Each structure stands twice: as structure tokens, then as C-alpha cells.
Image (spheres, grey):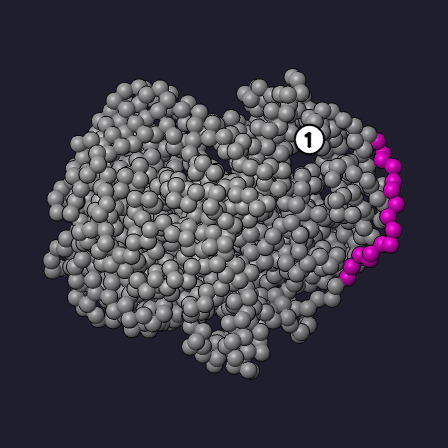
Amino acid sequence: MRLAIDIGGTFTDIVLEHKTDLFTKKVLTSSSQPEVAVIQGVVELLQENKINSSDIKMIIHGTTLATNAVIERKGAKTCFITTEGFRDVLDIGYESRFDQYDILIEKTMSLVPRKYRYVIEERTDINGNIIKPINTKKFQNLVDIIKNEKFESIGIGFLHSYGNPKNENELKEFLLKHLPDVEVSISSDVCPEIREYERFTTTVVNSYIKPLISTYLKKLDTKLRQKGFNCPLLLMTSGGTLTNVISACNNPVRLVESGPAGGAILATSIAEDLKLDKVISFDMGGTTAKITIIENQQAIKAREFEVDRKARFKKGSGLPLRIPVIEMVEIGAGGGSIARVNKLDQIITGPDSAGSNPGPACYSNGGDNPTITDADLVIGKIDADKFAGGKIDLSKEFAKNAITKNISDKLNIKTETAALAISEIVDETMSNAARVHTVEQGHETSNRTLIGFGGAAPLHISRVAEKLRVKKIIIPTNASVGSAVGFLKAPVGYEVVKSLRMLLNKFNFEKVYNLLTSMKDEAKKIIQNKSDKTEYIEERFAFMRYAGQGHEIKVPIDNEVFYTKDTNKIKESFETNYEKLYSRILPNADIEILTWSLSLSIIDEKSTKYIELDAYKSIKENSLIDFCDYESGEKIKIPNYERTNLKPGDFINGQCVITEDQTTIVVSNNFNTKVLSNNFLQMEHIDNE
Amino acid sequence: MNENNLIDDKNNIQNQVMWNRLLSVVEEQGQTLVRTAFSPIVRECGDISAGVFDLEGRMMAQAVTGTPGHVNSMAESVKHFINYFPLNTMCEGDIFITNDPWMGTGHLNDFVLTTPCFKDKKIVGLFSCTSHLTDIGGLGVGPDATDIHMEGLYIPMLKLANKGVMNKTLLKLISQNTRQPIETEGDVYSLAACNDIGCKRLVEMMKEFKIDDLKNLSDFIYDKSLSAVENEIKKIPNGVYKNSMMIDGFEKDIKLEARLKVSDNFISVDYTGTSDKSKFGINVPLSYTKAYTCFGLSCLVSAEIPNNAGSLKPFEIDAPLGSILNAPYPAAVCARHIIGQMLPDVVFGCLEKAIPEKVPAEGASCLWNITFRGITDRGANNNSLFAVTAVVNGGTGARPNKDGLSATAYPSGVRGTPVEINEAVAPLLFLKKEYNPGSGGKGKFNGGLGQVIEIKSAIDEDMDLLASFDRIKFPARGRLNGENGNAGQVSIKNKRKLNGKGTQVIKAGEILEIFTPGGGGHGDYSDRDKELMDTDVENELLRD
């Protein structure tokens, strides 16, 4: 029996897994002391299901705490110590503007202002040689400053420290000796990769949230023990693997965006169960939509992510973090996204959201901006009486008024047409993001299956599928708490990334082998105690490019090359991957390797309720409802089904809506729907059959 | 509402959706270019452009990633290609290439590739892209040349690929004429790949929306954009507004003079009165003059409207032939960006008289690219020669309601190069790269800060500095009583001043010291908010 806990901005979701059954609970997040709501929710859920805390074998936890601390600037008082002559790397950043034409942009400033950035004499060169050692005798002044200013956390980042961490390590040891109560993060530990701005920023974010996260995690751990839980507490990371409390306290930056990672893991496990090789995970909630590519039942991983995008999710307007993450694109498209008319008389949606307060106009809570939810209500996608299980009353009239006033009057079109247009535009926005993202990863959208979850995804998914020319859609059960469900599916594992630059024609097997071995030891240390199993899945990747290029591609490296010592195998692997991405390989260029990654994860036995059914049988609808037809814009009647009434083997022909407690599945007339053996819904494009 | 209206509404929405799609297609085209490029100024800094064109050569959409210098210079280049290679002679798999500064984007380092896009064996549109290659032979990336032929290999309008087969002769010729043969060849492939991706996506879109040509959609984009820009122009009082600005130049000071006329539905800018062309490579072809002038106008007039043939139409720009802003063949043009990037400031000075509440102060404006050339015992491919450009910036001018941006490119859209990357690709050692406190002009809002940078050879060798810096003699001016920003400086530390332009030797062991210019201030310093002043002091952002 296992528990998953997902702390979101508004709600804390708790899911109890008992054999193959899931029990869920939603409580309001207690922002100032998040552990309070967690304990309350967990205790209630166990009582309701008459389960003892000692029966729980594992607790898996993901939280937006780290992300929110950065976004709301609520982290610790932090200073940063860097190489003399380079005090402003954190603010100078890319020296560019994320918006070409807007002369009034604000750049995202560092979490550590200039006054808290200190420099010391030291220098390492590009080859890792220390050309200026540090002299700790000079540092008493620095210690005094840190004491006087009462810094809680220190970040250290020196040039080229990824190549040789000696100077950073020496300073860290010195500071810890003189300031035992202060947290210290060094860049060669947090992010040992070339490019100083990203490395330093990642280090500073780590320092900034470290005291907060470690205090919180230690408190939560203690409270859970007091309540009689004696099982391991594991944390979800942004990379989609689990880690223990100690390593999470040391490297809290790796917890940023762990919630969405859970969603991606859910999609991955569905892909495994249903044996789907090519998947797009589509997670649409109240404010954002998150899109992830799942390839051969694995989520695509990346090494860079931007937190706190200031300007409408625009690339480049946030703080870049170089950590292992699940590659995903997040855009401002959710149920609460606001629609408006721009200077070109175009309807645009998002990225700003009406949030939960005042919320969409139809909440009758003072909101007068039309949102996606308002459009969905007017179209008939949402049943006003059944929204959120009937817990929130929706006013169709308010929704119509908001759309009329802000959209249709301005464009001189019918309200219903405007509602259809809003829905169409947001679907196009999401499809475009999905398409660009898929292609950036070197894949196609059209031959994939869409897996949709999060409150708003089922309302929009069939149109998005049409736009992406996707033929198959899966909607799982418990779609609205997808992230927490995903935590339960996450592998226990850890990924280590290290830079070691080398030309392929000067490949040094021994050096690389030693590096990988040390990385493996590091990963092992972290995943030990998390499971009694000793069998690992080990994955090694090299980040490679043609010498002279600036962007690397990720290339799997077979362990065998270290026995055969054959660099041709590495070359082949690189060329295969390069060609797949960019159509032509370059005949004359040298190949180089910049960075290595190694991940270990523990093999888990899988359980699934899914079996392929032989036959599906058409069933009759529960009722007919009013709906705006996209083709004609006219009102039509379409069949409505209650999801609770659907059984495995049921088949629905063509257009319909399927209502459930927390969301509605809207099926366009291009899809048929099957209820699978595990109660998941599978929509199939009609041309396909 | 009758049925026709509904169909119109639907067409409108569909066109709008396809327009959005085109913008994402060209963005993908641009990203592909950045990800596959060799030239550091492309891959680290994004010095590129990418766009899609209809069969009349009208630009329909342009990638946001990229830099304004290419805005409508690339747009024009496609028309030149169509003139040279009539549409009915174009075949599937053809790729056209040029680096003609007057047909392309203003200097030989920019390669422009255009690829016709076919659907069902019928040509439906064209994709074009351009990127800045590190080296194209000649004297290298600096202003020293006195005619275009000294600046490197000059490629006329040619076919790079014929029905899918790459022109090996041309590729050989190109790689033989650069100091960086492998990288240059790689960049040509990269440009070709990005157009391929664009074509593929366009055809997919046309299939999805069941259209066979782009005429209707292109008209829609053109009309909507044109009328949107015209609406914005209507908000500006009609009139003639003049401005002039002095800059350093090479052999003599240069005066940039503009006469900006706002009419009901268009704006014209005439540079009559501007200095004559220079003997050296700081001259600007007219296409590049247009590009940066349009960019400056767009920022203040029509910032939210995407770039395309329609939105550029209401801007009419001209400069006298033979002036430095319309230098004809065979003028040397390699460092045309120095003056081109000053043009938004010139335009802003005109518009200050019309819309004072929207206009920022002058900034450093031209990129302070530090270009070195020398010998190396390492480098990416063990070449014995290296050529590297570190992209760095000064401060931007203070805005009407906030401080200028420190160490930030404007108007250029490129990124700076990381110190660690500069040291990885060339034998350089950076001793310093940080803000230069107090370098922004004081005002109610301060100008952005410049930087102080110190560099020496990491291997104790002499190396060449190919200087192309400006605003050393004439700093960025403040606006509405704001003070001027600091002028830039280039010197050998503690030894001697260097010239702002031209190739000079940095001897082994010597330290090159550079102060990039600060932006001008905006408004009276005595009106500056007390809290902002305290923050300046706390953060040691003022002069000692």
C-alpha cells in the first residue's frame, strides 16, 4: 500500500494505492505550513478507508513549494561568491531581450542582488588548471560579512569549476568550518556544466530554496513518524525519478516542477500498459497546459528548464536551470485563460488566467473576462449543473454576457460563433505548442496517441487531436488528479550529469570509464536505502555535436564500447541520431562529446488491469444535450453519457459528451469511443477503421 | 445573421488559425537553424532570420528568433531570387544561394538561402533564411577593407542544389575560401535543413486546411496587417519631424540626418543630409538601412503586429545614393551594423517631437563585438588560425517610465557569448567582465550600464583585434534633461589608447581593456525616486 501526495498552488491531492485500486482526496493547500494540510488529508483518507499508518509501505511526495518560493521570492537570505572580475554574471545573463519589439520589457533579475554578490581572487582555466589558487587567509572579512548580514544560505560559483572543483570545494570547507549553521551550495556540485550564467543561476536557485525545503521536509518527516508512518518518504524530482529526503535537502533545485513531472510519468505508465510506442501527454488544468513527448514508453528528458517566466510564458523571460528534467512545454492555456480581441481584430487566448478568484465569468464571482471555461459552457461542452460534481454553480448567462461584451460585439459576430472561435483558437495554440515541441525533439505528431488528463484536457482533446492529425486518444480514470497518480508510477532512481569535453578521434576510454564509474557510485549512494532491491537499470548518454556547433544532441552509449574500445560504435550512434533530427549528416566535421549523463533506476514489477477485449458493443445514451456545431455554428442535439454508467466493452459511435464528476469528455464526430478493460476511454479516429 | 456571414466568419477564423500556424512554422525553421549551426554568433547569439513568402515574393511571416537587421532586407532578397530564377523554372529540391550585400542582408558574411516549396508538384511558396557565418575570407570581420572584394568571397545568385543534388563545386569553392572550411560548409547545410523543415510543415498545413494555394491567406495577412499598422499611424499627429545625430565613423565623424514625415496612413523617413560614404567597410547598403529604420519605427508604432509585407508597407525609407546609408557597389560594407544599429536612435529623436511620452533615450546601440584573429595550438578543429567574435553590449537608453537595460543588446536581437564558451573556442583569457558602475546617464530614469571587460591571450601570443566600435567620441545622449551615458573606451590597460575601428595588434601579455558605452538618461535626475536612488547606492551601481 502506498501514498502519493501532490501539493499544488490551490489543492493538495492525496492518492492511496491499495493493490490496483486508487482512493483519492483533495484538501486545500495550507501555504504557510504545507505539512499541516498534508497530515490532515492523509489522516482523513486513511480513516475513511480504515487503514493503519503502519500498513503504508511508501510515501511519494511532489510539491510546488520549490517553484513557488522562487516565483514569489520567498526563499532564504542568500549571498553569492564568485570569481573576481565577474560579479554580474547573474544579471548580465544573455545580454538580450526576450521580446524584440517591446521596448518596455523588464528582465528577470537574479535572486541575489548585486549588493549580496561578493568576489574573491581565484581562477581556473578552460583546461581545468588552477591558475590562481584561493588563499583562505584572506577570507576572515568575508566570514564577518556573512555573520553580520545574517545570510542563511551561500552559493559559490567560479569560472570553469565544472572542469576542476578544487577552488569551490576549498572555499566551501572553509566557510562550513567557520559558519556551521549556514547552508552552502557550490556550482560544481549542483550543475557541473559549461556556460557560467546557467550554472551560477542554478546554483543560486538551489541556495535560495535550500533552507526552506530542508526545514519543511524535515518537519514533514518528523510529523509522519509521529503519526506512526515508518515507511520511506521519497520525493518526486523534475527529472521524473524519486529521491530521498537527504538528497532532496542538498539539491532542492531538482524538486522544481515535480508536479508536472508526475503527470508525464502517469502518461508513461499508461503507454507501457497499453503498449503504445509513440505518445503525446497532454495535461491541461486551470491555468496552463503541459505537453510532453513519450517515446518508446519513456518520457524525453532534457537538461534545461526555465523557472519564473516573467512575460506570458515567453522563452527567455525566466531563470534558466540546468538540471535533469522531463522535457515539456508549458503554455498559458487552461480553463481560466482569458480571451480577448487584439489590435488586428484577432481573438487571442491566455496566457493570463482568471485564476480561482474571481475565476471565469460563469462562476458569478465578479469576473467579467470571458475565459475558456465560459466558451466551453456556451458551446455546451460543460453541463452547468454538473460542473465539479455540482459543487460550483455556473451561470451560462454571465458567460454569454462576458463573451458578447468583450468579443462578439467587437467583431460583430454571434456570441456562439465567438465561443466556438475562442475554443478553436485555444486548441490551435495548444496544438501549435505541441507541434513545435514535438519537432524540436525530432519527432512527428501525426502517428502518435494523445493521453489526456487534468481538469480541462478532456474538453479539448478531440479537436487538438484533429489538429495534430492524431488518430487515437486515451483518457484514463482519475484524470483530474493525474500528477499524484503519476507519482505512484515513478521509478526510484537518480541521474548524474558531468561535463568532460573530448574529441571523438581523441577519445580516452580510461578517463571516461573512470568518470562514469564515479558517477555510478554517486547515483548508487543516493538510491540506496530507498529500496531493498539491488537490480538496477543503468542508462548512459553522451551529449555530442559536431566540433564547432553549439548545441548537443543526446546519444545513448552502450556499455559494450568500453570493452571493445571501438569509437566507431559511438560515431554510428551519433550519426543515426543526428540524421533523424536534421536530415543530413556532415561528411567532414569532427565529432565531440561535451557531457555525460548516467542514470540508475530500480526495476519495479508492473501490475496492470489492462487486457485487450475481443469485442465492443454499442450502447444507448443517457440523454441528449444542446451543443453548438463547429461546422455550421448551429445548435444541435448530441448524446450524453454518464461515465459511471460505462462498462468495459462499451462502444459509442461518433459525436457525444461523457460527463464525470470532475470533468467532461467531449468527443467530436470524427471519433468513436471504446471503454477499455481498465475503464480507460479510447477514442479512435473514424477514418482509421 | 445569414449563412454567408457565418461562412465569412469561419473563413476569417480559419485564416487567423493558419496565420498563427505560419508563425509557428517559421519559428521552427529558425530554431532548426540555431540548433544545427556551427558559427558561434548563430548558435550562441541567434544572428539569423527565417521566413515564408508567397509567389509574388511577399513575406507572409518571419521568425521571432533572429535579429532586426535581417527584417526586410531578407524580405527583399526573395524578390531578387524570383527575378533571377523565374518561378516556372524552379524545381522541387532546388536551393538558391547568395551573399550579395545589395541583394541580401548587407555584408558577405550573411548567406541567404531560398528554397521553393512544392505541394502536389506545384510550387506554392518559398522559404528563405539567413545566418551570419564566422569567416568568409578576405580581411576578416572588420571595417578595414576599402572595397567589397577585399572583404571575402562574393557569391552571386546561384543554385546551391539542383533537384535535390547539392552543388559540390560550389561547396568546394566556398570551403576553400574561408579560414574555417568545415564550419562554413556545416553552416550552409544548416541553412538548407531549416528551409526543408519549413516546406514540410507548410505542406502539412495546406493539406489539413484543404487549400491548394496561399493567395487567399497571403491577401488576408497582408490586408489585416496593413490596416492594423495604418490604424496605429493614425494615432500619431501628422507632421514633419527632424533629427540629427553625430557618431564616430572611421576616418571622419559622421552625421546622420533624418526627416520623418507622418501622414494619415504612412510614415516616410528621408536621410538627405547624411554624410557621404566612407572609404572603409562601415558603409550601409540601402536594404540594411531600411531594415533598422523599419525596426525602430515598429518598436514605437506597431510593436504588437507581426512582421510581413503588409505591416512593412506603410514605412517608406530612402537615403541619397552615395551617402553612407545608401552606399552602392563596390563600397566596403563588412561592418555595416555599426551605423545601421544607430538608426533607431535617429528615428526616435524624430518621434520625440510627435510622441514624447513613448520615446526612450539614446543607447549604446551598436553591438560592441570584440573580434580577434590569431594563431592557436588548439581550437575546435586544431586549425592553426582562429577567428572569434565575442558578442558584448553596452547599456540601452532609459525608457520614459523605467531605467535602461544594463549590458543588453538593442536594437540588435542577438545574445551575448558566455565567457566560458569564448575561452573554449579561442585561446583567450578574460580577466574581467562586469558592470561599469555609473556608466549610464543619470536621469529621472537612468540609462543602462555599460560593461568593463579585460582580455588577454591565454597562450602568450600576439593577436589581432579587428575593432569596430562606436560611441567613443560621441556618447549616447540623454532625453528631456537626462544626462548623457558614458562614452566607450578601448585601450591596452595602463599603456595606450586604441582606435575604435580597424585592425590593431594586442601583444602577448598585454591586456585589452574595453568599456562599453552606457545608455542615456531620461528626465531630470532631481526627480529620481528616492527608493531607486537608495537601491543604486546599496548595489554600488554609481560611480565611486
Outermost residue, front side: B89
Q: x%, y% of residue B22?
A: 52, 40
The quadrant where residue B41 appears: bottom left
Query: Is B49 positioned to the left or the right of B486 in the image?
Result: right
Q: x%, y% of residue A636?
A: 76, 26
Instruction: Name the one closer to the observer, B26 or A142.
Output: B26
Q: Chain of mark 1?
A: A
Instruction: Name the one closer to the observer, A556 or B340.
Output: B340
Q: Magenta stretch containing residue A613, yes or no? A: yes
Going by the numbered disc 1, the residue's amino acid type is Tyr
Residue under the image location 58 percent in, 78 percent down:
A560
Instruction: Name the one closer to the observer, B486 or B352.
Output: B352
Tell me how many marks there are: 1
Residue under the image location 27 percent in, 60 percent down:
B137
Instruction: Name the one closer to the observer, A137 or B500.
Output: B500
Residue under the image location 65 percent in, 17 percent down:
B1
Answer yes or no: is residue A17 visible.
yes
**Residue at mark 1:** A630
User: In this rendering, is residue A284 above or below A579?
Assistant: above
Q: x%, y% of residue B105?
A: 33, 45
Residue under the image location 55 percent in, 55 percent down:
A441
Q: Magenta stretch containing residue A550, yes or no? A: no
The quadrant where residue B5 appears: top right
Query: Is B76 positioned to the left or the right of A280 in the image?
Result: left
Instruction: Name the dominant secondary structure of the magenta segment.
Output: loop
Q: Which residues are magenta?
A: A607-623
Answer yes or no: is residue B449 visible.
no
